[in-house]
Image: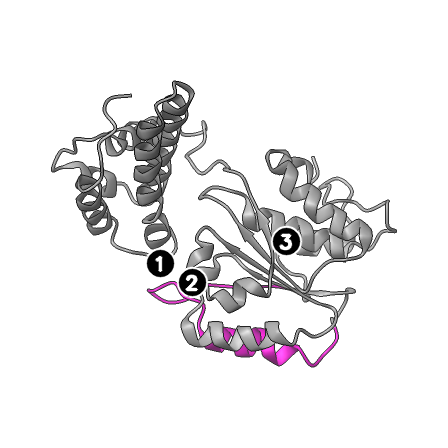
Amino acid sequence: MSVWEALQSQERAVAQLRRSIDRGRTPHAYLFSGPPGAPLYDTAIALAMALSCQRAPGDGCDGDPDAMCGACAKIAGGIHPDVVTLAREGAAQIVPIESVRNQVIARLGFPPHEGAIRVFLIEEATAIAPPAANALLKTLEEPPARTLFILCTTAPDQLLPTIRSRCQRVRFAAGTALPSDADPARAARVAALGAELAGDAHEPSLPVRIAEAKGDAAPVLVAAARALHVRAYAAATDGNTEMARHAGSRAQTILSWHTAVAIHNANPQLAIEALIVQLRGLPQVGAP
């Protein structure tokens, strides 16, 4: 299966990107945005492959593992010199200004090493430190030729408006962020905790139980938001728009903490405790 085929759940986003490629109108910067679990970074890698593929147009390997050209194989392996991911660093998990200076600005005066284009990927754009964001903005204002930036984020509203305005937006649908069936016990635990968090009553032990398994807090937040979205859809279908609005509001509040937990390394127990305080101030939605 090629990387594009693996993104079938994102038909609209993929179609938008492939149209730009086919017409030769790829912009200098994309902003990929979507809910937690959407395959933003995977799509960025697929796009980098499509633009760097060494095969003739119309005969590209499309990232097919059984037929990859040399360029696509290097991108898949993370070793292509012209495809650079700006990694988060330190306890705060931010992209520091040094990364922008050393990995981006220092390369802009030179042509790509091997391919037709150099691609810079940022897996979570809200992790860019303010000085780094300002340095990146200057580059986006005067983009060099043969350069593409792909910024991925689950919280586009947290980016500088000037950065958003200089990127072509691609919106993604929900993806799969919960534990897979390979670990059914963990998946069941996350789903149960998510349902409990989505409810109106919260036991005092809930933040501790969510945080006790490392890495489960973010999936629990996603599970809770999904449960509330299901409730909102059911209420809207029944004509109860007020209840649908309340459920949607609680889901948005829950997801607002996902970036802090999953990206910025916030203490999961304290984050869940603060979230529950917020939820208490919102209208209740009742039992599912």
Q: Are marks 1 and 2 in contact (CB under 8 Å)?
A: yes
For this rendering, which residue is in front, 221 or 115?
221
Q: Nearer the viewer, mark 2 or mark 3?
A: 2
As drawn, is 91 to the left or to the right of 76? left
As drawn, is 46 to the left or to the right of 157? right
Label for residue 5?
Answer: none
Sequence-wise, which precedes: disc 1 or disc 3?
A: 3
Amino acid beneath label 3: Gly
Label for residue 264?
Answer: 1
Crowding near the residue tagged with mark 1, few <14, some 14–19, many ≥20 C-alpha atoms within 10 Å: some
Q: State the extent of the magenta-drawn residues as a range.
A: 83-111
Q: Residue reaching furthest left?
A: 204
Query: What SS does tag 1 mark?
Result: loop
Query: What SS does tag 3 mark?
Result: helix
Q: Residue 234 falls in which quadrant of the image?
A: top left
Residue 273 lies, in percent from the top left, at 18, 46
Q: Quadrant of the C terminus?
A: top left
Sequence-wise, which precedes: disc 1 or disc 2?
A: 2
Residue 122 lies, in percent from the top left, at 53, 61
For this rendering, which residue is in front, 69 or 40?
40
Sequence-wise, which precedes: disc 2 or disc 3?
A: 3
Res. 186 visible in picture: no
- Above or below, comparing residue 166 to residue 183 in the picture: below
Crowding near the residue tagged with mark 2, few <14, some 14–19, many ≥20 C-alpha atoms within 10 Å: many
Q: Residue 88 falls in which quadrant of the image?
A: bottom left
Residue wearing tag 2? 127
Residue wearing tag 3? 77
Query: What SS does tag 2 mark?
Result: helix
Identify which residue is drawn at 47% across, 55% down. Answer: 156
